[in-house]
């Protein structure tokens, strides 16, 4: 199996009917970066910047962050990298950050909420990204945005840091892309405004599922109760894809869903063409992509989706078996 995937890593992720799919890596440590080559990924779709913060014993300085982001971009060797700004709080704690004892951490002070309430922290991180890139392109996206105003505020901080860098003579690429994580359901009803403010959208299906179904992602008793292949989540995802397509904005998905072949196949059927996942998942997903007739499957999925009253998993699994996907 392992040798099969090593050989497959050199084959293009193109469906049987010729649709190219971008397979990207989720990363968070420098040691993740060599996997880009090993599994033949197209770039980093999600760099979780909180991981290096979580493994340190004190808050990293701007210089430390700058050095880290520079090395990430070095190791990507020209492939695109999307950095997500600090996503702490909820289930991700910083040992040196005491302000986080909350009754309901998933609904609490986390991610962009902290960044906007402590703008010096977010500005330092954005400054480090700009300095670390040193004129090379990169993408940056903001986690847990619930309101388009939060996105505007976060972008304004980024613009201020860009202006500061320019004033100080720091090289800045003209190809910087700004995006937002779609993981709080309220954003689905603000997509018109959101899509005028960003270059791309990245769906965080782990949190989107948690908030859509009111089911704590860390509580196995309730998390296992709802299936990601349920009509509710699939309808939300289909809507997001069609709105992004209509507005000419790129959309990808970087939650755990993308890493399972049956789910990944369903996402392609909904219109996703870019999936980001852990390195260990890319081989199996690439094999699925290469054996799928996407046009036929998409037509089938659209039909089955509207008629369905429960998880589509059994039907999709049968489809995959019957069509040798
Ligand atoms: C998600 O919510 O799906 C996601 C990719 O982010 P995280 O798992 O880091 O919250
Ligand atoms: Mg998330």
Image (spheres, rainbow, N blue to C red):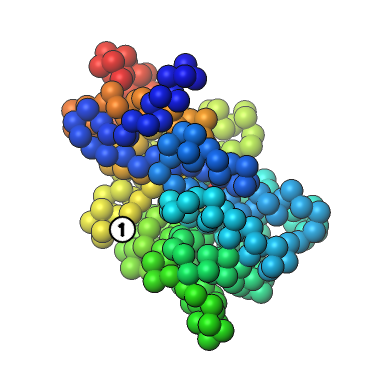
View extreme (bottom): residue: 167
Label tally: 1
Q: Position of residue 136 (x, y in %)?
A: 46, 65
Kindly identify the residue that appears in the image at 48 percent across and 30 percent down: 281
Is 112 left, or right, of 319 in this rendering? right
- Residue 299 in sight: no
Kindly identify the residue that appears in the image at 59 percent across and 56 percent down: 71
View extreme (top): residue: 322
Q: Position of residue 264 (x, y in %)?
A: 38, 32
- Residue 242 in sight: yes
Kindly identify the residue that appears in the image at 65 percent across and 62 percent down: 67
Secondary element at tag 1: loop
Q: Position of residue 26 (x, y in %)?
A: 52, 43
Q: Position of residue 215 (x, y in %)?
A: 56, 38
Q: Provide the residue designation for mark 1.
A: 249
Is 55 left, or right, of 15 in this rendering? right
């Amino acid at each position: 199996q392992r040798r099969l995937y090593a050989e497959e890593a050199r084959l293009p992720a193109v469906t049987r009917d010729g649709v190219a799919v971008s397979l990207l890596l989720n990363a968070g440590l420098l040691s993740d970066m060599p996997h880009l080559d090993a599994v033949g990924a197209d770039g980093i779709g999600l760099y979780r910047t909180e991981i290096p913060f979580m493994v340190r014993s004190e808050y990293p300085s701007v210089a430390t962050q700058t050095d880290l982001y520079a090395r990430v971009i070095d190791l990507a060797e020209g492939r695109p990298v999307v950095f997500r700004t600090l996503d702490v709080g909820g289930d991700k704690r910083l040992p040196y950050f005491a302000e986080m004892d909350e009754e309901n951490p998933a609904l609490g002070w986390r991610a962009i909420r902290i960044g906007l309430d402590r703008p010096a922290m977010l500005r330092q991180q954005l400054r480090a990204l700009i300095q670390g890139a040193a004129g090379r392109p990169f993408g940056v996206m903001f986690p847990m945005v619930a309101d388009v105003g939060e996105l505007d505020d976060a972008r304004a901080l980024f613009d201020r840091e860009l202006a500061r860098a320019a004033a100080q003579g720091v090289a800045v690429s003209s190809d910087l892309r700004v995006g937002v994580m779609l993981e709080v359901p309220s954003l689905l009803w603000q997509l018109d405004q959101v899509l005028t403010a960003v270059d791309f959208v990245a769906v965080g299906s782990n949190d989107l599922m948690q908030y859509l179904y009111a089911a704590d992602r860390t509580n196995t008793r309730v998390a296992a109760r709802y299936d990601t292949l349920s009509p509710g989540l699939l309808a939300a995802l289909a809507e997001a894809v069609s709105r992004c397509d209509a507005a000419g904005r790129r959309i990808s998905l970087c939650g755990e869903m993308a890493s399972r072949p049956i789910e990944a196949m369903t996402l392609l059927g909904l219109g996703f063409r870019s999936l980001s996942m852990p390195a260990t998942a890319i081989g199996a997903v690439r094999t699925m992509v290469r054996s799928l007739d996407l046009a036929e499957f998409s037509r089938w999925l659209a039909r089955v989706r509207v008629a369905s009253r429960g998880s589509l998993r059994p039907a999709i699994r049968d489809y995959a078996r019957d069509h040798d996907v």
